[in-house]
Image: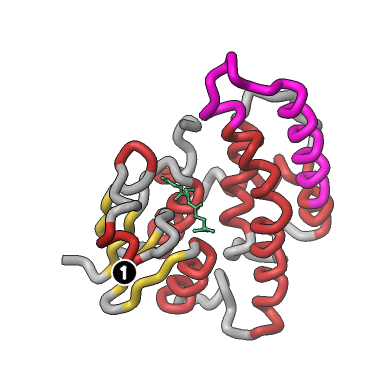
């Protein structure tokens, strides 16, 4: 039996973050499908692990942990011997935290309705006007990321870090939704590098569902 167990379905963006990191860091794990069509996440035993009834949740020996970014930080601190993904130095991790918070407060709240509206809503139930407004808003958010990537090769500086990973999952959705896209040169350059990462290839590049 592996020490690390992950609950969550493969097409959840928050689960994908954790699976991708495990692949990049070669952390062995077992996984149980949970969420949406798999159910599980509203059962009493699951709610004892995560009272929010959301995926992912992990159990690593005795530690139970939910919130995908907390899980990313925990696994990086424990397994990343290079100390690059989420450096122990508070000075170096500050920018990574900035972008992880920006993902949660700014980027995902806009990408989420765009993704749900175009992928998980029947065509006849889509509000196309509203979706176009959201697309324009998402584009202006990605312009901020593009501007950052003009001055640094990766989101938080010279290396791939935890700052890149969740934002790359948003970028994947942006590049794969059936929408018009403004040309963001630096974002595209960065994303080509993202596409080479093993965790992205294995867990984050399947067609959107
Ligand atoms: N802030 C949480 C959000 C977790 C979340 O919203 N998970 C979604 C999937 S991406 C979920 O569990 N949805 C219910 C379901 O799949 O049934 C995190 O980052 O882990």
Q: Residues within 10 Å of mark 1 (few under 14, many from 20)?
A: some
Does the rendering let one see residue 49? yes
> Percent x, y for residue 137?
80, 39
- The residue indicated by pointer 1 is 59
Does the rendering let one see residue 24? no
Query: Chief secondary structure of the magenta span?
Result: helix
Quarter holding the N terminus is bottom left
The furthest residue to the front: 44
* Residue 29 location, quadrant: bottom left
> Percent x, y for residue 2?
21, 66
The furthest residue to the top: 124
Residue 40 in the figure: left or right of residue 66? left
Q: Does residue 134 show up magenta in the picture?
A: yes
- Front residue (pair 10, 23): 10
Q: What secondary structure is marked by label 1?
A: strand
User: Which stretch is magenta?
Assistant: 117-144
- Residue at 25 percent across and 62 percent down: it is 45
- Residue at 38 percent across and 62 percent down: it is 57
- Front residue (pair 174, 195): 174
- Front residue (pair 131, 202): 131
> Percent x, y for residue 47?
34, 61
- Residue at 36 percent across and 51 percent down: it is 8
Q: Does the residue labelled 1 lie within 8 Å of ligand 1?
A: no
- Residue at 32 percent across and 67 percent down: it is 48
């Amino acid at each position: 039996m592996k020490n690390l167990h992950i609950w969550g379905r493969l097409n959840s963006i928050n689960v994908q973050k954790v699976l991708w990191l495990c692949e990049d860091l070669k952390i062995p794990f077992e996984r149980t499908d949970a969420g949406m069509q798999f159910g599980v996440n509203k059962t009493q035993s699951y709610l004892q692990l995560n009272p929010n009834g959301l995926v992912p949740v992990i159990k690593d020996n005795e530690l139970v942990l939910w919130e995908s970014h907390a899980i990313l930080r925990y696994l990086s601190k424990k397994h990343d011997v290079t100390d690059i993904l989420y450096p122990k130095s508070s000075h170096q991790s500050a920018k990574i935290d900035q972008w992880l918070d920006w993902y949660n407060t700014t980027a995902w709240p806009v990408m989420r309705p765009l993704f749900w509206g175009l992928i998980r809503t029947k065509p006849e139930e889509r509000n196309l006007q509203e979706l176009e407004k959201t697309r324009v808003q998402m584009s202006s958010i990605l312009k901020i990321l593009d501007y950052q990537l003009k001055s640094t090769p990766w989101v938080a500086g010279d290396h791939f870090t935890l700052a890149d990973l969740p934002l790359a999952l948003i970028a994947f959705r942006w590049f794969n939704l059936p929408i018009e896209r403004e040309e963001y040169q630096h974002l595209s350059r960065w994303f080509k590098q993202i596409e080479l990462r093993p965790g992205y290839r294995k867990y984050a590049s399947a067609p959107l569902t």
